[in-house]
Image (cartoon, rainbow, N blue to C red):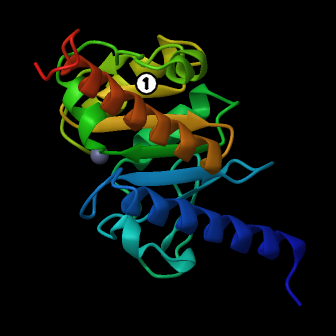
């Protein structure tokens, strides 16, 4: 019989798999890009997707369990943790309220990120739920510099739910991975509406 702890871990591994696949098939990310993680409740451990494995191909056993200091605790498929593990762990340290993180590359939100301005909140639900989506500067994926930009964006905007990452994608934060996924989806939907609204003239024609 499985211990309660093992049952919880299996449930969380399945949940992370589910939202990884949903992000891919929802076109929030392509190729082997993007990474997602969740904080294991009542521990200092984080379950994170593997490097080099498309979110479409995620399986419960491809995720790695890491301690918040970076040590690998469980690695059933002998993979490498996401190269962005550094900024995931940094966000969990800065924000005790965050229990799930979705980092994806959705095209409309990413296109807006290149303006180096906050995302235009073109819908009432976007404004109410997101409040602000600030932008952070660009740096190479997996770099220490990018990790510093993420830390600056999160600590500079208390309670922020999403950041645009210039020339790269978005970071969505939630109390759990389900909430983080829905924030990522809302950010992209808001960016799409902002883009479409910006292309429609007052008389209804296309600009
Ligand atoms: Zn990325």
Q: Position of residue 96 (x, y in %)?
A: 69, 30
* Mark 1 surroundings within 10 Å by alpha-carbon count, few (fewer than 14), some (14 through 19), many (20 or more): some
**Which residue appears farthest toward the left when viewing the image?**
207
Q: Residue at x 53, y 46 (%)?
A: 181
x and y percentages locating residue 60 in the rendered image: 57, 76
Q: Please indicate whether residue 68 sits to the left or right of residue 184 in the image.
A: right
For the point 45% across and 72% down, the residue is: 58
Vertically, is 125 above or below 55?
above
Q: Quadrant of residue 205?
A: top left
- Quadrant where the N terminus sits is bottom right
Q: Position of residue 93 (x, y in %)?
A: 59, 32
Which residue reaches farthest bottom?
1
Q: Is residue 3 above or below residue 120?
A: below
Give the residue displayed 24% in from the left and 41% down from the top.
107
Task: Please state, as top left, top right, bottom left or bottom right, where the C terminus lies in the image.
Answer: top left
Residue 166 appears in the rendering: no
- The residue where tag 1 is placed is 151
Labels in figure, total = 1
Q: Is residue 153 left or right of residue 44?
A: left
Q: Position of residue 197 (x, y in %)?
A: 28, 20
Vertical placement of residue 2 versus 133, above or below: below
Q: Residue furthest front?
A: 203
């Amino acid at each position: 019989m499985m211990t309660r702890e093992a049952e919880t871990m299996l449930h969380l591994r399945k949940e992370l798999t589910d939202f990884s696949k949903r992000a891919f098939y929802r076109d929030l990310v392509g190729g082997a890009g993007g990474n997602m993680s969740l904080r294991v409740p009542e521990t200092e451990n984080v379950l994170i997707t593997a490097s080099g494995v498309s979110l479409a191909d995620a399986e419960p056993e491809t995720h790695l369990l890491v301690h918040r200091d970076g040590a690998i605790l469980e690695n059933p498929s002998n993979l490498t943790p996401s190269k962005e593990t550094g900024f995931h762990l940094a966000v969990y340290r800065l924000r005790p309220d965050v229990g799930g993180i979705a980092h994806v590359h959705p095209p409309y939100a990413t296109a807006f990120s290149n303006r180096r301005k906050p995302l235009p909140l073109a819908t009432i639900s976007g404004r109410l739920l997101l409040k602000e989506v600030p932008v952070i500067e660009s740096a190479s994926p997996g770099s220490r510099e990018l990790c510093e930009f993420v830390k600056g964006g999160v600590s500079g905007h208390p309670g922020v739910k999403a950041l645009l990452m210039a020339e790269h994608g978005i970071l969505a934060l939630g109390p759990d991975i389900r909430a983080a996924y829905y924030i990522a989806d809302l950010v992209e939907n808001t960016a799409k509406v902002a883009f479409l609204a910006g292309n429609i003239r007052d008389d209804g024609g296309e600009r």
